[in-house]
Amino acid sequence: MTFNVEKIRQDFPILQRKVNGYPLVYFDNAATSQKPQAVIDCMVDYYSHYNANIHRGVHTLSQEATDAYEAARRKIQKHFQILHPEEVIFTSGTTHGINLVAHGFANFLKKGDEVLVSALEHHSNIVPWQMLCEKTGAILKVIPMNEAGELVMDAFEALLSEKTQLVFINHVSNALGTINPIAEIIDKAHAKGAAVLVDGAQSCAHEKPNLAELDVDFYVTSAHKMCGPTGVGILYGKKQWLEKLPPYQGGGEMIKEVTFEKTTYAELPHKFEAGTPNICGGIAFGAAVDYLNSIGFDEIEAYEKELLHYATQELLKIEGLKIYGTSKKKTSVVSFNIKDIHPYDIGTIVDKLGIAVRTGHHCAQPVMQFYKIPGTVRASFSFYNTKEEIDKLVEAVKKAKSMLS
Ligand code: C6P
């Protein structure tokens, strides 16, 4: 398919709306992506025609819903190039997946063991591990970053040792857009016998990872970052890890047999899927994956690179504007500030002109502490954005600057 942004924009009904009297310019894609009609239709179809609980009923609706949910699991398995469908655990999102693994690792860690986190992480990939360390006496060490917002790989190698049990790292920094060298990190961690968890929340909308080839131990992401609904995501884990990890929650669906004396657990993936899941969300996640693949990840990557280049070039023409995160390897995120102006004020003024950006620490306070700033203005672009929209952002930021200086 040739990339036709105007045609693609028609797939997203929300892009037709106005905000404060101006056509919506949605540049908060790193927080959550917009949803194409195909995903919305899929959800309406589920609730209109075959809403039922799954894996439980012999009746037709339950069977249809179960089949659609399991078909979505296989679709997602194929998309992320995962070897076995039972290695795909449906979760409520990235945060849930990380907490599930951190909870399980309490069984494996002992006092003095080390776990490595990167300086670029979202709070979701910091706090659960701190809680784990408090519980087990393991030590959390931090892979530092440099001024460009890249990880210092020599320091990473120096931190790795036989004591390292686990490395957790995002593929892409949500605050800066830096793409981390995860293949290299996985290889080096494995050479020391450490397992690796990759947080794919910020990369999954921009590229298609090959998890089998990466040989990663755990991978987590959220559907809502990649045109799917909120409240659903996946945890991928290598079968041998998932079999070793204890269940995270107890309840219906995750059991083989329950007596008051003892409960035995269901096989994968159900062992980790207690309770009624987000059935509609899981099915719609499958529809989102289909949608993105129909556009094509090569096309998405190439187009977003153009947007990033253009936005960087045009924003830097504004005097006093500084971009945080200047790695050559970035997704389409521009995090910036203007000298002496609070990011919140810029965000508020551009919103009055219909432009949605995120302002603040982006749930990555350590990144802000590194730069000694309270936060940034973050514009994050998707394949349905245009250069004309970037021009509007540049004009709006200039206006904000003149009003606030
Ligand atoms: N980042 C952002 O504006 P959940 O909320 O579980 O779907 O995803 C959490 C999460 C974990 N890791 C990374 C790298 C993320 O970017 C996010 C979510 C959003 O940057 C909302 S805070």
Image (tube, rainbow, N blue to C red):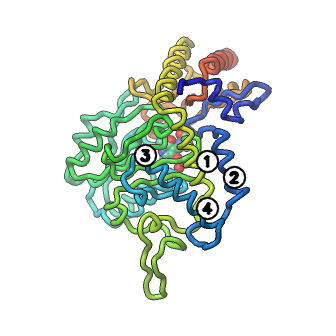
Task: Answer whether labels 3 and 1 touch (C-beta < 8 Å).
Answer: no
Residue 262 in the image: x percent, y percent? 43, 84
Mark 3 or 4, which is nearer the eye? 4
Q: Of label 3 and label 2, which has the lower sequence position? A: 2
Determine which quarter of the picture holds residue 242: bottom left
Q: Which residue is mark 1?
A: 229
- Residue 45's label in the rendered image is 2
Q: Badge 2 local density, few (<14 within 10 Å), some, or many (20+)?
A: few
Secondary element under disc 2, as helix, strand or loop, is helix
Q: Badge 4 local density, few (<14 within 10 Å), some, or many (20+)?
A: many
Q: Which residue is mark 4?
A: 65
Q: Of label 4 and label 2, which has the lower sequence position? A: 2
Q: Which residue is at 47% across, 66% downward?
A: 270
Q: 99 left or right of 286?
A: left
Q: Of label 4 and label 1, which has the lower sequence position? A: 4
Instruction: Tell me the kind of residue under disc 4.
Output: Ala
Q: Which residue is mark 3?
A: 80
Residue 9 in the image: x percent, y percent? 65, 29
Secondary element under disc 1, as helix, strand or loop, is loop
Instruction: Tell me the kind of residue under disc 2.
Output: Asp
